[in-house]
Image (cartoon, rainbow, N blue to C red):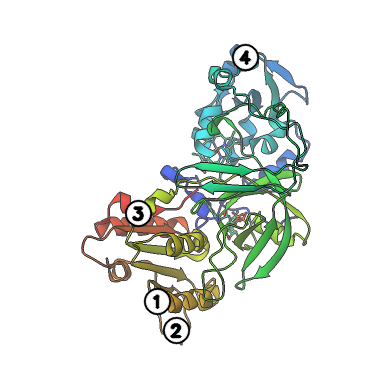
């Protein structure tokens, strides 16, 4: 059995406490963690009140179930009795009640499209809506016939993504060098253009190739994508990893990294479309990371499409880039650093201030120092909150004194971007201090869920 503490969940310092837009998670009562919910769903208790029967639900019927102790919600045509889940919902009972007795699909998607409700609520399923929701009109109008293939093609094909213009170029190679009389027909469901907001997250199973210790608690995981898969995670975006833990699918966000920082030894190869790398801190009392850590080489993990609101256009004409990272908040900075130092022509200065508890917690310290030595535009400062007496570097937590000294523009009016990522209190405090130092909203990007 997993050993999960039963106090508030996630922990107050968990990065998962605040999502973008400042919606906070609420402290849950004792015994109401995700693991406790999974246990309840496996207990055999009748959670719908229908003794396992599935029913067709009319709109009128749905509307009647709009109270906390009798609350049904429809998501993508399926109706769930969410009353038993009320006290376990990390967003709180009032948030869940906003969708009581109605179709909560849009609301659900606005807040957390990636949450795996089908698996988490499978014991709460009441049934389907009596009338299947009609396919939105736009679908039919936008239906386009794509050129399917009538002849065999080679397994290996190339994909080029031109991020700044949003173009994808796919080059397929014929298996036999003959002329094709016709191209073929679209496969089922392959001839639709569906707006991203109307699709769930797509997961592909990736194989664990290696797992390598980076610090005492953080590891570099390398996953191999399935053959013929092209997954390019844009700079600053994250994906969701999914594992089945005691019979329930659990999903958590992680930011892919490159497997190294630019250094004199390696070429700046950003696009390696076969492998995807993650730097992940293992929390012994956490829910997801111990399971991930227990995987064997060759085991599978599901990886979603990328999500996130960082845009490469934020780098346009950038002159100074400042990065503020705490702990595993370093992960988005990896691709940002590599991208910035190779792709922004007018960039004069890139500085990273990296906050940790002790020297042992610093991820890729020697790589960062090497990079600073090699590239004169780059500089790194480590700040420790619990250093040993031998530590000569900076000490403490994010503060006005540290920031005002660190954030010096290379020219009075140079174009700057400050990226900040870490546990929620760190990020919130950092944003407040940056505003106090007169940096504008457009000059700050914070990474949250
Ligand atoms: C956009 C985004 C990107 C991210 N990218 C990365 C990344 O690249 N690398 C990375 O390592 N992380 C990343 N994270 C964090 C990651 O998603 C998880 O939150 C993290 O891995 C912890 O997951 P867990 O299930 O193992 O721990 P959780 O179960 O969430 O626990 C987290 C902490 O809380 C403690 N805890 C758990 N339950 C309780 C309880 N009931 N009472 C008190 N304490 C408790 C645990 O011991 C642990 O210290 C990212 C988060 C976001 C939002
Ligand atoms: C439809 C109405 C709903 C609303 C308005 C709502 C709102 C919220 C809010 C505000 C949060 C906290 C902030 C965030 O993480 O983004 C949250 C978190 C969460 N909700 Fe909901 N929710 C709804 C339905 C559901 C349902 C049906 C489930 C079923 C499984 C669910 C599962 C979760 C989970 C697992 C989290 C934590 C996400 C994380 O770890 O970041 N929610 N919700």
- Queried on whether the Cβ of the residue with tag 2 lies below 8 angstroms from ligand 1, the answer reads no
From the top left corner, tell me how far across and down residue 53 is, in percent: 77, 22
- Labels 2 and 4: the sequence-earlier one: 4
Q: Which residue is mark 2?
A: 391
Circles 4 and 1 in contact, beta carbons < 8 Å: no
- Return the residue nearer the eye: 156 or 389: 156
Q: Which residue is mark 4?
A: 61
441 left or right of 113 in image: left
- Labels 3 and 4: the sequence-earlier one: 4
- Labels 4 and 1: the sequence-earlier one: 4
Circles 3 and 1 in contact, beta carbons < 8 Å: no
From the top left corner, tell me how far across and down residue 11 is, in percent: 54, 55
Q: Which residue is mark 3?
A: 444
From the top left corner, tell me how far across and down residue 27 is, in percent: 51, 47
Q: Residues within 10 Å of mark 2 (few under 14, many from 20)?
A: few
- Label 2 and label 4: CA atoms lie apart by 66 Å
- Label 3 and label 4: CA atoms lie apart by 48 Å
- Queried on whether the Cβ of the residue with tag 3 lies below 8 angstroms from ligand 1, the answer reads no
Secondary structure beneath dot 3 equals: strand
Res. 115 image quadrant:
top right
The answer to whether 88 is drawn above or below residue 127 in the figure is below
Q: Residues within 10 Å of mark 4 (few under 14, many from 20)?
A: few
Q: Is residue 136 visible?
A: yes
Q: Which residue is mark 1?
A: 395
- Return the residue nearer the eye: 325 or 342: 342
- Label 2 and label 1: CA atoms lie apart by 9 Å
- Label 3 and label 1: CA atoms lie apart by 24 Å
Residue at the far bottom in the pictured view: 390
Residue at image coords 63%, 66%: 219
Picture quadrant of ligand 1? bottom right
The answer to whether 166 is drawn above or below residue 84 in the figure is below
């Amino acid at each position: 059995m997993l050993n999960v503490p039963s106090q508030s969940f996630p922990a107050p310092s968990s990065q998962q406490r605040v999502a973008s837009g400042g919606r906070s998670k609420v402290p849950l009562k004792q015994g109401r963690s995700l693991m406790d919910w999974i246990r309840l769903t496996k207990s055999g208790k009748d959670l719908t009140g229908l003794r396992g029967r599935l029913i067709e639900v009319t709109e009128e019927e749905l509307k009647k179930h709009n109270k906390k102790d009798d609350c049904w919600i429809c998501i993508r045509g399926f109706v769930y009795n969410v009353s038993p889940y009320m006290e376990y919902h990390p967003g709180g009972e009032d948030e869940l009640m906003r969708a009581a007795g109605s179709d909560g699909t849009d609301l659900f998607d606005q807040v957390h499209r990636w949450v795996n409700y089908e698996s988490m609520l499978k014991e709460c399923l009441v049934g389907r809506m009596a009338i299947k929701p009609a396919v939105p009109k736009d679908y039919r109008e936008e239906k386009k016939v794509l050129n399917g293939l009538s002849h065999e093609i080679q397994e290996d094909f190339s994909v080029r993504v031109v991020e700044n213009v949003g173009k994808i170029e796919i080059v397929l190679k014929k298996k036999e060098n003959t002329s094709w009389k016709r191209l073929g027909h679209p496969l089922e469901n392959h001839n639709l253009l569906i707006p991203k907001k109307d699709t769930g997250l797509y997961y592909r199973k990736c194989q664990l190739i290696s797992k390598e210790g980076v610090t005492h608690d953080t590891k570099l995981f390398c996953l191999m994508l399935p053959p013929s898969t092209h997954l390019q995670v844009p700079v600053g975006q994250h994906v969701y990893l999914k594992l089945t833990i005691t019979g329930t699918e659990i999903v958590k966000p992680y930011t892919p990294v490159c497997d190294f920082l630019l250094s004199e030894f390696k070429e700046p190869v950003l696009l390696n479309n076969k492998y995807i790398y993650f730097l992940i801190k293992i929390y012994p009392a956490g829910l997801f990371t111990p399971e991930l850590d227990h995987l064997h080489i060759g085991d599978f993990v599901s990886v979603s499409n990328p999500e996130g609101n960082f845009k490469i256009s934020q780098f346009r004409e950038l002159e100074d880039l400042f990065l503020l990272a705490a702990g595993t908040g370093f992960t988005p900075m990896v691709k940002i650093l590599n991208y910035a130092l190779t792709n922004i022509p007018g960039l004069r200065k890139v500085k990273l201030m990296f906050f940790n508890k002790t020297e042992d917690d610093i991820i890729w310290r020697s790589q960062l120092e090497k990079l600073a030595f090699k590239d004169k535009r780059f500089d790194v400062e480590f700040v420790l909150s619990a250093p040993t007496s031998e530590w000569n570097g900076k000490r403490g937590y994010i503060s006005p004194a540290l920031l005002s000294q660190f954030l010096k523009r290379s020219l009075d009016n140079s174009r700057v971007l400050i990226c900040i990522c870490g546990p929620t209190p760190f990020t919130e405090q950092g944003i407040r201090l940056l505003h106090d130092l007169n940096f504008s909203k457009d000059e700050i990007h914070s990474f949250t869920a």
